[in-house]
Amino acid sequence: MLSATDNHKPESLVANANSSHFPIINNQIHLLRPQSGSGGSYVKGLSCLSWRFGVESNNVIGWKTIPVTCEDYIGHYMVGSQYRKDSKVITNEAILYAKSINLSKNGKDVWIFDIDETTLSNLPYYAQHGFGYVEPFNATSFNAWVGTAKAPALPESVKLYRELVSLGVKVVFLTGRTEDQRTVTETNLKRAGYHTWDKLLLKGKEFSGKTAVAYKSAQRKKVEEEYGYRIIGNIGDQWSDLLGTNTGLRTFKLPDPMYYIS
């Protein structure tokens, strides 16, 4: 977690991230606004900011955890203002794009949303588990967190969602969460402000062992070819949300330097 020499100690970060006030207050997802955390952190001769750029541009791939020297930096980035600013740039561009295109009049225009770290934020969980500096990822503890249905929304994504609904665009949630998590996911989405959608697609047993790219490509193909929709937009925090086939007319990548999914 964050070192004791930083302005904000680990225990204060965890306490704030897990307090009853963590969900959106005045449209803010986090109470803390600490320093950027970039100073003095290096990995393989490069700054952690440069490492994060490599991750977001999909040049640094296949990694399991964040570099040990970058844990402080990533923690500060995720709970600080820069993560929110970066997310806002992406969603504002998505809104401008959505308003610029000619929508069909048949009700078949849809927008694909990923869920974790896109529509919902799991920062209360990751604040307790090292912001991606864990080995290995503990599926049991993460699934227990998912089961609470208490993940707050990423406010920028809620804004995009509302704009799309107002334009008459239908929403499809496509997630790597499994079918046994359908009820808690529906509950969490509604609590976070996503009150209507056309489809919620979760990972069935037939996709066990498949990569996220293969799974999401197959689901998007079904959306277009079986359900007859036109995917006008697609947003996610992982490149695996956006690569493959049937990706839509335009894709938008939200920041997430905490983990990598192939």
Image: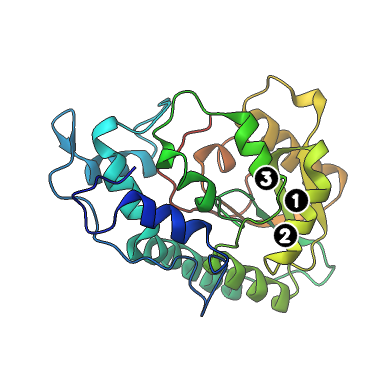
Q: Earlier in the sequence, mark 3 or mark 2?
A: 3
Tell me the amino acid under the disc marked 1.
Thr
Q: Residues within 10 Å of mark 3 (few under 14, many from 20)?
A: some
Query: Nearest the camera: 101 or 13?
Result: 13
CB-based contact (under 8 Å), mark 3 and mark 2: no
Identity, as a three-letter code, of the amino acid under mark 3: Val
The kind of secondary structure element at disc 1 is helix
Residue 53 can be seen, yes or no:
no
Please tell me whether residue 167 is drawn above or below residue 179 in the rendered image: below
Of 242 and 45, the residue lying toward us: 45
* Disc 2: CA contacts within 10 A as few (<14), some (14-19) or many (>=20): many
Q: CA distance from mark 3 to mark 2?
A: 11 Å
Position above or below: 199 against 244:
below
Q: CA distance from mark 2 to mark 1?
A: 6 Å
Give the labeled residue for mark 3.
146
The structure residue drawn at horizontal position 33% and vertical position 54%, both measured from the top left corner, is: 77
